[in-house]
Amino acid sequence: MTARGRISAFQFFCTVFVCRIIALFTFIITDKNAFPPGDRSVIFLPFLLTGLLAFLPAALVTGKKEDRTIFTLTDRLHPAISRGTGLLYAAGAIWSAGVSLVRFDLFMSTVMFSGAKLWGFILFLIAAAVLIALRGPETIARMSVPILALLAASLLYVSVTTGKEFDAANLEPPLRNGILQLVKNGYSAVARTSEMAALLVMAPRINGGVKKGIFFWLLTFGVTVSAVYTLISGVTGAYGERQMFQLYALTVLSKLGVIERLDALICAIWVLCSLTRLAVYILTAGMFLNGGFHVSENAKLYIGICIPIAAVYFALSGSVTSFSKVLASGVNEYVFSGLLIAVPLAVLLAERIGRKRKEIR
C-alpha cells in the first residue's frame, strides 16, 4: 500500500511504459537508410546506455533519499529562477503533448479512418485527459497497470499468431551504417521518453527505489522494442519497410483460428495509451507551473494548458510530410537534451556554487 497522494515506483514505471510504447506504435521512421532494420533489432543496447547517462542528472537532482524536486534547488537560488524553470518545463510538456497528439492523429487518419478529419475526436480526447489529470497521479498510475496488462496480452497475441510466418532470411545484419549511427538512433529513442522529466517534480511522491527502477525500465522497454522490430522484420520483410506504421501492418496479419482481424480491438487499447500519455503531460505541466508560480492545480489551469497543446496539434497536423520534416530537424532531441540534461546540470552546479559561497562567508 502507498500513502495517500503517493504512488509506488512500480506504478510510476508502468505509467511511463504505457506512455512510451504508444510513441513506438505511432513512430514514423523519417529516414529508413539512417535507421536500417538490422540496427532496430539491437537498439536496446544504445537505448540502455545512453538512457542511463541521460537520466543521471534527474537522479542527482532528486538526491540520495529521492525527496527533492528541481524546485528544492532553484528556490535556494532565486524565485525568478524557479518561475523560469517551471515555465520552461511546462512548455516542454506542452510541446511533447502536442507532438504526441499529431502522431496519434496521423496514425488514425491514415490507417484506421483514411482521409478522415479527426480534430473533433482529438478535442474529446483532450477533455477526457483533463478529467483524468484532475484526479491526480494516483488515478493515472492505477489505470496504467491494467492497460499495461492489456498491452502485454495484445503483443503476445500478435507474436503468437504471426510467429509462424517469421523468416530469418528477412533479417538484416546490424551496424550497416556503423556504430556511431546506432548510438545516435539509440539516443533518439531515449529522447522520445520525455515523460521521465516528471521525476524532477514528482520524485518525493513516489515510494520505492526510483533510481534502481530506471535501469530495469530502460532494459525492459529496450528489449521489448528490439523484439518487436525483429518480429516485424522477420514477418513482413520488404512489405513492412514500405508501411508508414509497421507494427499496425503486423497486427493486420495476425489471426488465430476463426478469430481474425483483431487490429481494431488492439487499436482501442492504443487509444487508452494515448489518453494516458496526454493526461500525464497535462498533469506534469500543471505540477511544474505549481512549483514555479505556486498556482493551484485545478480545472482552470489544466484547461489553460490544453490551449497551447491544441495549438501545437493544429499547427503540425497538416500533413505527414511537413510533420516528418519537423521530426527530422532533431527538435525533440534538442528539447529532451535541454530539459533532462542541460538544465538539471546547470541548476545542480549553480546550487553547489551558491552553497560553497555561503560556507566561505
Image: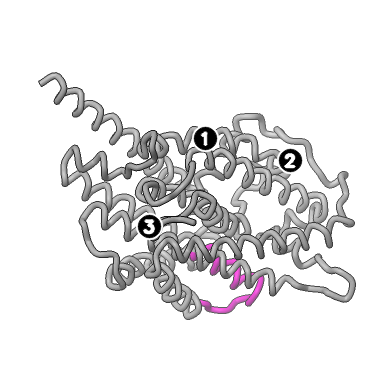
Q: Which of 315 and 41 is in front in this view?
A: 41
Real-space Cα separation, disc 3 to disc 2, in angstroms = 36 Å
Instruction: Please tell me whether residue 2 is drawn above or below residue 204 in the rendered image.
Output: below
Q: Which residue is drawn at 41% across and 74% down?
A: 131
User: Residue 187: where, in percent of width, then height?
Assistant: 54, 39
Instruction: Please tell me whether residue 250 is drawn above or below residue 86 in the rendered image.
Output: below
Image check: 352 left or right of 241? Answer: left
Tag 3 secondary structure: helix
Magenta region, residue range = 101-118
Residue hosting label 1: 52
Image check: 91 left or right of 295? Answer: right
Pointer 3 with pointer 2, Cβ within 8 A: no
Amino acid type, residue under disc 2 in the picture: Gly
Instruction: Please tell me whether residue 173 is drawn above or below residue 295 in the rendered image.
Output: above
Is residue 106 inside the magenta stretch?
yes
Residue 38 numbered tag = 2
Q: Residue at x 81, y 52 (%)?
A: 237
Q: Residue at x 31, y 43 (%)?
A: 70
Residue hosting label 3: 284
Amino acid type, residue under disc 3 in the picture: Thr
Real-space Cα separation, disc 3 to disc 1, in angstroms = 22 Å
- Regarding residue 185, the answer to whether it shows in the image is no
